[in-house]
Image (cartoon, helix red, strand yellow):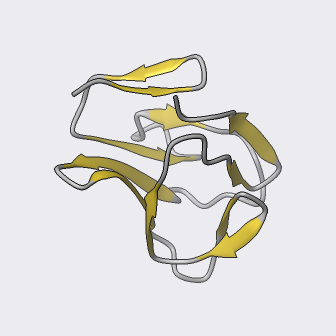
Amino acid sequence: DLEIIGPYKVYYDSISIGTSTKNDLIIEDPDISDLHMLLTSSTDGLICQGIDESMDYQVNDKHFRGKKKLAKKDKIKIGKNDFFKRFL
């Protein structure tokens, strides 16, 4: 199934997010690591996984590390970036 993330449509099983040019989504932010996170589509829905355990991310203004299953309309913040507005 196609996941819609804010203005982005996810056509892949997973996308990598971080500062490295090797990622699918590259973010220039000193608070984000080279490979900061993976968003993975599974039969259970969309899974957010922090790769660098020393760095966190926020879902609905709560801090997380590791894996978190995302619900519809969850808001994600990575570093100073609030670019994933809402899951539809």
Q: Is residue 62 left or right of residue 3?
A: right
Residues 33 and 40: in front is 40
Q: What residue occupies the far right of the structure in this picture?
A: 80
Q: Position of residue 67 (x, y in %)?
A: 42, 71
Label tally: 0
Q: Position of residue 45 (x, y in %)?
A: 30, 49
Classify 79 as above or below 53: above
Q: Is residue 84 left or right of residue 16?
A: right
Q: Quadrant of residue 86?
A: top right
Q: Position of residue 15 (x, y in %)?
A: 36, 40
Q: Is residue 25 left or right of residue 61?
A: left
Q: Residue at x 48, y 51 (%)?
A: 71
Q: Residue at x 76, y 47 (%)?
A: 29
Q: Is residue 67 left or right of residue 31?
A: left
Classify 39 as above or below 9: below
Residues 51 and 57: in front is 57
Q: Residue at x 40, y 34 (%)?
A: 24
Q: What residue occupies the far left of the structure in this picture?
A: 43
Q: Residue at x 61, y 48 (%)?
A: 74
Q: Position of residue 48 (x, y in %)?
A: 44, 58
Classify 17 as above or below 67: above
Check the picture and name the quadrant holding the N terminus: top left
Residues 31 and 22: in front is 31
